[in-house]
Structures are given as structure tokens and as C-alpha cells.
Image (cartoon, rainbow, N blue to C red):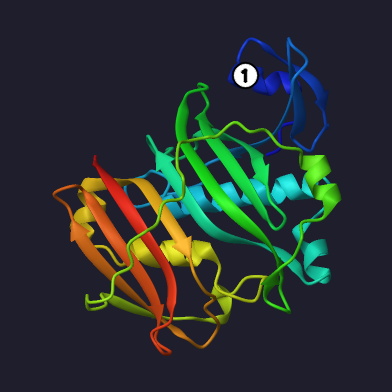
Amino acid sequence: MSIDNPRTIKQFLPSYWIIATFSHNRGHIVLEDLRGNMQNYFYKKFELRYFDMNKHGVASPTTILTLLEETAAEHSYSIDYCLYNLEKKNIGWVLTSGTIDMIRYPKYKETILIKTWVSKFTLVKGYRENIIFDDSGDIIGRARGIWVFYDIEKKKPVPIIDEIKTKWGINPEISRENNFEKIKVLNDEKHQLEYDIYKSDVDNNKHVNNIRYFHWLIESLPDEIMDSYFLKVINAKFFSEANFGEKIRIFNKNEMEQKTFLHTMRSSINNRLLAAAHTTWGKK
């Protein structure tokens, strides 16, 4: 459900912030500190459903990514730039790099609050920050992503609309320290799994959604990893599109002495590099 009262979020704010403006029923607020500095945040509240859970009764990593992207979509809607309206103009947002760092995963029926904002704009990129709170106001996760404004038909970046930049504003605060470091790409390992790409895997940008990549990555890992460890950190980079009719091959390298994995995804067509990731796992 959406935040519909500024008092609902006060418990998540430092004492020196006051609410300067609040967009009712949209979740978008502008904060002002005692020195008059303005900060733009957007909040979205979720109650975790049964179908969001894994077999251990906690939210899956894929669920967390889905809720983060739902929050970003709502942020766009809150400034009257609904993603479906952008799609009519053959424009969308494409994730090129991202990182998630989880302290713990929420349980069934638990309520979480996601706080998001944009820390930086370039001509074609937006740097999105996220902090995830539980219903006690404690931080349980952080995430960052680089999103490119993209012409869907021409398949190339385009300048971000000025009004989007103005309405979202920027807040240079960083949600977690991460410079989107280079991720090692695997070349010699044999692939663990191969997936067919179906129509349901393709999003409005006419290519495989990054949530599907994330789901396939998790599915490719041995049960003993998923049963004994939880995904603490993922750093990922997306290199090229995958489309309906292709097959995706997943290559993994286990470095469990450091509790880490390297992952590479390639197309079965000419071995094209699609994505690479580095994951760190914590003991349950």
C-alpha cells in the first residue's frame, strides 16, 4: 500500500529533518533540514505475501529486487511519467549495473518500507539509491542501480527528459559505498544450466527483464548453498540484450572459502555475453 500520511514515515527520519512538502497518496516527499537544504525522497510500503516467500518462509532475493523495481516504477508514476506512457513514446529505463546488500530478509506478513531517491544524473543515466527498513525502523538492506534512459525501437540511450530531472531532483547521499566495480567474466568454465527464453520472460522494453536473470542465477546454485546460506551481497552488470527464442547459459565459479560465487550469463547464439555477477553469501 502507499504511504498516505507524512506522520507514517517520521519514525524513519533523522530528528533534524522536517517535511516541507508531501504529495498525498503518491508517497513523494521533499524534506528540508534546519539549514534549509532540500532532499527528495520517495517511500513505498509493502506487506510481504505468501507467494513472496521461499521454502524457508522468508522473502526470496528475487522478491526484494522486484519490490525495489516496483518502488522505482511508482516513483516515476508519482511525477506523472508512468512507465506505460513512456513506452508509448518508445522510451524506457534499462538497468545496466546494480548492487544489493541485505542484512536479513523479511518474513511472511512483515511490513517493510523502501526509501528511494536519485543521487546523480548524467545526460542519459540516473543513479538510484535505496534503503529498506523493517516495521521497527531498522535498516535491513541497501541497494544501488545505474539506469539508462533508452529508446526501445532504436536500441540506444537518449537524453533524460528535463522535467523528470526537475521533478525527481537529486540528493547526493549514497545508500551504500559501491563504485560499481568491474566484475570478472568467466570464460573457461562449463555451463551449469541452460534456460529457454519464453514470451513471459520479456518485458515492455522488448528484452529479458533483469529480474529474470536474477531468478535464473539463484536457480542455478546447488541446494546446499540455498539451504545453509543466504544471499548477502550481489554486484551485477548487464552487457547486452537477450530476446525471445534464445537460450541462456549460466556459468558459475564457486569460491566458498571466501563465501563468494562468480556468475556469467551468455546466449547460446554465438556465446554472446549477457550479464556477469559476483555474489557473497552469509551463513544462516
- In the image: residue 87, left or right of residue 8: right
According to the image, label 1 marks what residue? 13
Q: How far across and how far down the image is residue 69, in percent?
A: 60, 52
Query: Relative to residue 21, is residue 165 depicted above or below?
Result: below
The residue at the point 22 percent across, 77 percent down is 188
| Total numbered labels placed on residues in the image | 1
Is residue 5 at least partly visible in the picture? no
Q: Which is more toward the observer, 232 or 96?
A: 96
Quadrant (top left, top right, bottom left, bottom right) of the N terminus? top right
Q: Which is more toward the observer, 74 or 184?
A: 184
Image quadrant in which you'd find residue 40: top right
- In the image: residue 110, left or right of residue 186: right
- In the image: residue 170, left or right of residue 220: right
The residue at the point 66 percent across, 71 percent down is 205
Image quadrant in which you'd find residue 33: top right
The residue at the point 51 percent across, 88 percent down is 245
Task: Classify mark 1: residues with Cα within 10 Å, few (<14), some (14-19) or many (20+).
Answer: few
Q: How far across and how far down the image is residue 215, in percent?
A: 42, 63
Query: Relative to residue 251, is residue 64 depicted above or below?
Result: above
Q: How far across and how far down the image is residue 95, in percent?
A: 58, 59
- In the image: residue 117, left or right of residue 248: right
Q: How far across and how far down the image is residue 116, in percent?
A: 63, 38
Quadrant (top left, top right, bottom left, bottom right) of the C terminus? top left
The residue at the point 74 percent across, 11 percent down is 35
Label 1 element class:
loop
At label 1, the amino acid type is Leu
Image quadrant in which you'd find residue 87: bottom right
Is residue 141 at least partly visible in the picture? yes
